Amino acid sequence: MSSLAAVARPGGAVRGSTLVRSLGLVIGLAVVLVLVTDALGSYQQLQLAQGAYYFAALAGLTVLIGLSGKISLGHGAFMAVGAYTVMLLVGQGWALLPAVAAAAIVSAAIGIPVGIAASRLEGPYLAGATLAFAVGLPALADRFPSLLGGANGLTINPPAVPSFLGANVSLEQWQAWIGCAGALVALFGLYNLVHSGVGRSLRATRDDEIAAALCGLDVARQQTLAFVVSASCAGLAGGLYAAVLNLASPGAFPLTLSLSLLTGVVVGGLGSLAGAAWGAAILVLLPSWTNSLAHSLSLGTNAQGNLPFAIYGLVLIGLMLAWPSGIQGGLGALMRYMSNKRRRG
Amino acid sequence: MTKFIDLTLSGVSSGAIYAAVALALVLIWRATRIVNFAQGAMLMITTYIGSELITSTGSYVIGFLAALAGGLVLGAVVERALMRPVENKPELNAVIVTLGLYTFLVALAGIIWGDTPRPFPAAFSILGYDVGGTHVLFAPNDTFIVLVVVALAIGLGALFRFTDFGLRLRAAAFNSEVAELLGVRVGRMFTAGWGLAALTGAIAGVLVAPSVFLSPNSFDPILISGFVAAVLGGLDSPPGALVGAAVLGLVLSYVGGYEGTELVPMAALVVLVIVLLIRPTGLFPVSKGRRV
């Protein structure tokens, strides 16, 4: 992950066109991830797959919030859209790959009206509207139980490991690969977007809407575009969720999921793709660590079940107070401090 | 027709609860420009405090007052200890701190009091008034709820409008630098604003607890409705919060009664989107200078 942090910084050591750099980054990471999954146990492979779909959602959200300045508390709902799309299409006999691609497209399509509305709203009003979206949309599953399965949701069979891979590749490893492949697609697309003219226009709009408008940029259109891109990434993440966990239900996409996504983005480091990777690691590993910590202490049932969340909350508060610019920002400051110290001798 | 009246009355009663939560959020927003997602968890803690005291002393009034006092202290401590360091940082940092506090307080309540819901006594009878032989969906306790919230709103309005302390609170919220120059202790005003807000939330918690029961997560839906109501009204405007809460309470009650409860969250979204698309800063926006 630290190699990602080093390479993903714009103007880093690797020169050349953005396309070449991003291809190199993605291929390099793919090789590393294939090697890594071989060494992991099946539980860790599942965690890697989870981290991968979280990364896809977080990377899209960090581009939205960090680059366009628009906030969303509703990206969990786009994940739900993606997951339900995969469920319905695979149920119709589609293969997994086109179904996941369709999940990203359907979410993007729903992101268009939401994004147009979002481009008109500011700060807490946008937060309120997207929050209502996060709560309202998954509730639709209860309204159409015959199509969407009601509160129980929908399930599909786990994806079959292709026969040419032989018996060496387990189901968990295959799912980890699916998740990572999706995450890398998101990384590739977003990396190129961020380092393109569109990314520059977005940053200009974020920093000063009026100046950007005077330069001829269509502010509302830029912001809508950012929203659609991030919605599409969240839909992709939801599709990967469906591919990894093979289920979609309203309870799987509660408001807390949307709030966790926001948390991951800010704690990782806002506006940075490497920060999204840190955020995904936090979202997957921190609950698992606090859980095993609570289990290692012998406590009553009330304490055992709740202690992980208490620690999780405290860690969030502590991280925000200690590192206001997130993990990636904190690491950056640390690196600068170290190199300054070295230069002074 | 009876159904319509029933739904209207229950909408007024739930609207009053949303109003109290919305007022708490508006007070904090005005003072420190923070949306306090921990509000639901803070009022849950104070309601547990009230519940403990009602059980041990047998007096509803003592429990009620203890919850209010708990809210005042909790709000002030949270502002001073957790929010002060992030007040001048990027605004999302404060949001994440309130989310962390929410997670922590809910877990803490689970550790101390357990996750099993427990009943909470109502101040008055919850059996509906007898009108012409049928019980309507509005009980003496609902009258109590509405009266307390109206009194709260009038009290807060008078505090802000007619007292020196209220003037200082408004000055600190309106322009903290100028207020500081004129001798207002802005930091203390922020602490006081959070305390007042948490007290308002504590009232909402005690009022709604009899109908939702008391558990670490039982106030989450009310926080969401309160937030939607506050946004509807315009986060800067306490009267707006009251109107927004009344509108939301009535609409959600009608939708739930006529169309089915599963549509209620969607209805909140639809109302909010319609209002915000027409008026992007709520029903009662505070007029801003035209930006050039």
Image (spheres, coloured by chain):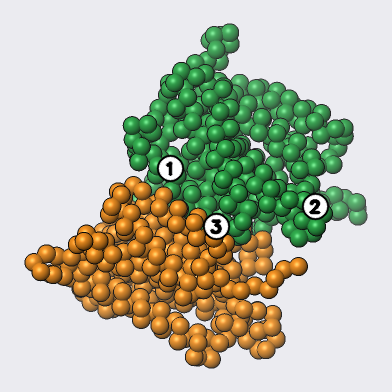
What colour is chain B?
orange
Q: Amino acid at mark 3?
A: Leu
Using a 10 Å C-alpha cutoff, classify the residue at mark 1 as few (fewer than 14 neighbours), some (14 to 19) or many (20 or more): many
Measure how far apart labels 2 and 1 are at the Cα level: 39 Å
The residue tagged 3 is B277
Q: Which chain is green?
A: A
Q: Which residue is more in the foreground, B132 or A133?
A: B132
Measure how far apart labels 3 and 2 are at the Cα level: 25 Å
Task: Report the chain holding disc 3.
Answer: B
Upstream in the sequence, badge 2 or badge 1?
Answer: 1
The circle drawn on residue A138 is: 1
Task: Report the chain holding disc 2.
Answer: A
The residue tagged 2 is A216
Task: Report the chain holding disc 1.
Answer: A
Taking the spot 58% from the left edge, 8% from the top edge, the residue there is: A164
Taking the spot 44% from the left edge, 81% from the top edge, the residue there is: B156
Using a 10 Å C-alpha cutoff, classify the residue at mark 2 as few (fewer than 14 neighbours), some (14 to 19) or many (20 or more): few
- The mark closer to the camera, 2 or 1, is 2
